[in-house]
Image (cartoon, coloured by chain):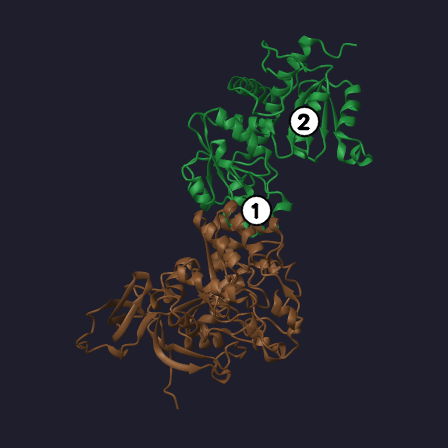
Amino acid sequence: MTKRVAFRNARLIDPAAKLDVKGGLLVENGRIADVGARLFNDADANDPEIIDCKGMVLAPGLIDMRVFTGEPGSEHRETLESASLAAAAGGVTTIVVMPNTDPVIDEPSLVDFIRRRAQATAKVRVLPMAALTKNLGGEVMTEIGLLTEAGAVAFGDGDRTISNTRVLRRALSYAATFGVLVIGHAEDPDLSQGASVTEGEFAMRLGLPAAPAAAEAIIVERDIRLVEMTGVRYHFGQISTRASLDAIAAAKQRGLPITCGVAAHNLALNELDVGAYLTFMKVKPPLRSEADRAAMLEGVGSGLIDVIVSGHDPQAADTKRQPFAQAAFGAVGLETLLPVALGLVHDGGASLSHVLQTLTAAPARILQRNSGTLAKGAPADLVLIDTNDAFTVREGDLRSRARNTPFEGRSFHGRAHKTFVGGECVFERRAKR
Amino acid sequence: MTPARADTLLKSSHLLGIEALSVGEITALLDLADTYVALSRSASKKTDLLKGRTLINLFFEPSTRTQSSFELAGKRLGADVLNMAVRTSSVSKGETLIDTATTLNAMRPDILVVRHQDSGAAELLSRKLDCCVVNAGDGSHEHPTQALLDALTIRRRGRKFEGLVVAICGDVLHSRVARSNLHLLLKMGARVRLVAPRTLLPGDAERFGVEVFHDMKKGLEGVDVVMMLRLQLERMTGAFVPSTREYFRFYGLDADKLKAAKPGALVMHPGPMNRGVEIDSAVADDIEVSVIQEQVEMGVAIRMAVLDALSRGLAREGRNAP
């Protein structure tokens, strides 16, 4: 029997189709069967289950291209299941999980493990990324062909930069053979060794070990040269400085197959937020100067930055309750990704449709998926967004196993109200008590 | 340098590579080799053409099959053959290549067959020695007798070079066999495809006038000849390709991939084979398609032809006179 769900009275936003209209949407067997302004205007559909959207925004579910979990190896930090619960609550219907686990995802059988585990436990779609070098060692390339066949959607060493240029050149060249996507991390490992914040006056006052912001652009510029040589499809996972953005702008101008992302925390916070050694502000890339943060906002607005990611990196309390220099890097972000992004709309930096594009159509295009759109036939991965929902982040409300949010106590305007994956409701926000 | 000799089979007094040969020279060598195939198949395999001549096999890299092939070729032509494995002697004592050359020169050989790990080594020796030099493989540069024996094998299987489509598959980047074959096949009017991952191809491979494929099935589509290359062990484990199992999955010749080639396509391999790495045993041992054993036989005939051709110049010049 065909399972049908009708959404009516929605503000439909589909950035992929440049659509922003009031109307309805029909889901049949987990796929979008129809969409349009006149659909269900008269509420005449009597057989399907009807969801009244009450004028809220109905958009494609978010695709988060950068999520770390602790599965396998450190499940106390996060499992695929707990990450998926946080994702669903954040309106995220697809997560790309990083290979930085224990063991590292560098073997076809481990890609298979992630896929099976996700199928059995996760509420949202999980796309495994595989390491580009074995054991993230930066020396020996992984079996890119076999890993792709096993289901890896992209390759990269997560939050590690491959410092050996010869190794990287060959790995990129080999990756280009198979036409796969490489997601790189730009942070010169030697310049940033031991550093916990970005270099500058504030770091000097705090007396914290710091790395120059140029540590990022140096690698960005190097990798652009290698992309030029090898022709590989290359995505900078997270950039955070104006210099990086300028280099990428020039590379895009030259027609190179390069895209880039920015982490929500680099859009919303700057180096001063570290304040009195708040370790939850110790993240990668580090929080930058206000000028660099402004450049990131500008980049999203202009479209030069293709995607916004959460950079979700759950850390247990004991690794954060440490002197700043010894504390772990990372912040959870799945549940705050959409609220932070909507902040750009409220501040006038970008239209709602444009911001949603960086979270749906753009990542889908880069990952070559057929989701991230409301087009007929696409999977019914949807988020119903209440743009009027004002709230304050409380770590106790988070679904993630780890609570290391840098946004504790901050107020936002707008978040996911309901989330659907393949037409099934995976999250519904309960009314406030 | 020895002046060009218009009336002999080869213009040069050395065989350093295919690149410098003309179509006429290649054809003449193949024709001559045909006669040595016949001789080698007869009961009395020996002639006294090179009687009194000294042939030195100077191998800086170990090679069983090329060295024995040259040795046999020399002996069948009646020459005195001396095998020198240099890895175990002079080099370990600090002798340079030039020193070795001068020493050998004093021994007055007529023909020197040299295999060396460095590209250009045969060329260097040819400038320092008074005898004929045959390149039996220099680094990643050329291995002319291999390309000639491959051509002989193809021709004796009734294939015409003009318009023939040949896929050269595997480690083209490091392969002297690939380079020599490339030159020969293109000179003879064949169309050449290179099939390999990007890491095993030179950067501007297309500039050679070949078609480049990264997908083996597409690369083999409709080809007349599949030439497999050997993947060196040290290149299998991470630097150029991630693993042997991945290489075999995507670039190893098996029955499934071979289906893309023209029915009756020839399968060739210069040997020694890495079974289960670049070629599946089922294909390598299939006498319907594999001409790998024939290649070995043609190797001796080609080397006899080369030694014969070069020695004609020697005789006329009356070299080695005091």
The image shows residue B267 at horizontal and vertical percentages of 50, 36
Disc 1 target residue:
B277
The reply to whether residue A333 is in sight is: yes
Question: For the point 59% across and 80% down, which residue is it?
Answer: A317
The reply to whether residue B71 is in sight is: no
Mark 1 vs mark 2, foreground winner is: 2
Q: Nearer the viewer, residue B39 or B150?
A: B150
For mark 2, give the secondary structure: helix
Relative to A367, is B46 above or below? above
The 10 Å Cα crowd at callout 1, few under 14, some 14 to 19, many 20 or more, is: many
Q: Quadrant of residue A274?
A: bottom right
Looking at the image, residue A55 sits to the left or right of residue A74; the answer is left
Chain designation of label 1: B
Looking at the image, residue A353 sits to the left or right of residue B243; the answer is left
Relative to B131, is B98 above or below? below
Colour in which the image shows chain A: brown
Which chain does green denote in the image?
Answer: B
The image shows residue A284 at horizontal and vertical percentages of 56, 67
Question: For the point 21% across and 77% down, which residue is it?
Answer: A47
The image shows residue B100 at horizontal and vertical percentages of 77, 27
| Quadrant of the image containing the C terminus of chain B | top right
